[in-house]
Image (cartoon, rainbow, N blue to C red):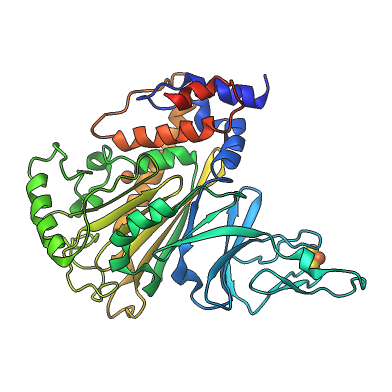
Amino acid sequence: MSAIEKVSDLMAQYRAGYSLPGPLYYDQDVFDLEMKAIFGTQWLFACNECEVKEPGDYLTLELGRNSIIIVRDDNGEVTAWHNTCRHRGSRICQEHKGSVGRLVCPYHQWTYDLDGTLLAATQMPDDFDPKRYSLKPVHVCNVAGLVYICLAKEPPDLEHFKRTVSPYIIPHQPARTKVAFESVLIEKANWKLVIENNRECYHCAGNHPELLVSLVEAALPNDTRTHWFGDLMKRKGNEWDALGLPHQPVNGGIEFRCIRLPFNEGVTSMTMDGKPACKKLVGDLTERDLGSVRMFHVPNNWNHFLSDHIIHFRVIPRGPMETEVRTTWLVHEDAVEGWDYDVNRLAEVWQITNQQDQVLAEQNFLGVQSDAYEPGPYSPTGEFMILDFNRWYTTTMGEHLPPGAPGLRVAAE
Ligand code: FES
Ligand code: FE
């Protein structure tokens, strides 16, 4: 059986409403197709544009065999390039982040402008045409300060997403922030289990006492699991309407979600005691009691936009069995550490929560590899967002299976 037949066969075993067949979480051929069909094709969250604030500031991102440079050019635009020299292919930027005037390959010093054009290459013949050896570009879309990249030649449309979520995000002005703290966790779990774990709060009551100081388990304004939540949502919604801050859930289909939800009564930030994390509010906000805008975009990004800080989460697979989760905590660019905020206090809740989630995802991953594992039913109320994610996943993978493959039946359901 060829790899594609095997993947197709596994996809055909998927039953909507149930967790995925085990090998879809750990099989190398499945992962290889995911790297093409999903991580090589879809828009991926890379960073906040404030991380490359000045021309020449860059950071790199490893996506399977590809390394990408995200750099601000001399016109102030955020651009992205394959971090692969057009001479003999060496990596150019070998640090994760830095600042450069030009992109100079360390091997033989081919030198590129920040717009990707080759400026200098010594010892090449007279007929050598540097115009033919620009860096290979990667698509970039800046969504209200959040940088998304896409490796596809023809990227899917991101305009609907951009137009829909921007009004929710813009009041928090992500571009006018700075990274106060960053954490990178390498989790021994398949990336889909990391996402599944994020897409539900069914596990919160049993695992996240620190997070639940602020977060309410309800995911929609009309959530019936907490009878008091509807009243709180109505009251806060009226306050936010008066401030001109959108809060209703958007229609992002199975690709994205965006909503502003309140925290528990009296809580303004995701701290251990629910009190502010930073004296200075982000953007030009004047009110603290704004809950958080929760925005998720398949396949690798979720965020919280609070009144006093922003948290971005970025998921990048490193193999079928290992996933990098990068979290950044951002505060107003003028906030002063030690005066406006304390880093430990700012990051404590989500650092603890991330570690708890790491254990949950890793134990889940061990379990799905057992001979005893068989796909189990999701809760329609507690895990409805995983149903959306799995529908997106099987549809996207199905589009990359050959015509007539059994996996396509799944995509059509
Ligand atoms: Fe980059 Fe030779 S490989 S200059
Ligand atoms: Fe969790």
| x and y, in percent, of residue 206 in the image | 24, 39
Pick the residue in front: 290 or 404. Answer: 404
Pick the residue in front: 125 or 100. Answer: 125
- Image region (quadrant) for ligand 2: top left
Task: Tell me: 364 left or right of 220.
Answer: right
Please indicate, yes or no, whether residue 205 appears anywhere in the rendered image: yes
Task: Tell me: 177 left or right of 345.
Answer: right
Residue 137 picture quarter: bottom right
| x and y, in percent, of residue 95 in the image | 62, 67
Task: Tell me: 6 left or right of 253.
Answer: right
Q: Residue 374, relative to residue 339: is it above or below?
A: above
Q: Residue 115, relative to residue 327: is it above or below?
A: below
Quarter holding the N terminus is: top right
Task: Tell me: 330 left or right of 84.
Answer: left
| x and y, in percent, of residue 289 in the image | 16, 64
| x and y, in percent, of residue 340 in the image | 27, 78
Q: Residue at x 11, y 62 (%)?
A: 239
Quarter holding the C terminus is: top left
Q: Residue at x 26, y 69 (%)?
A: 308
For the image, the number of numbered tags is 0
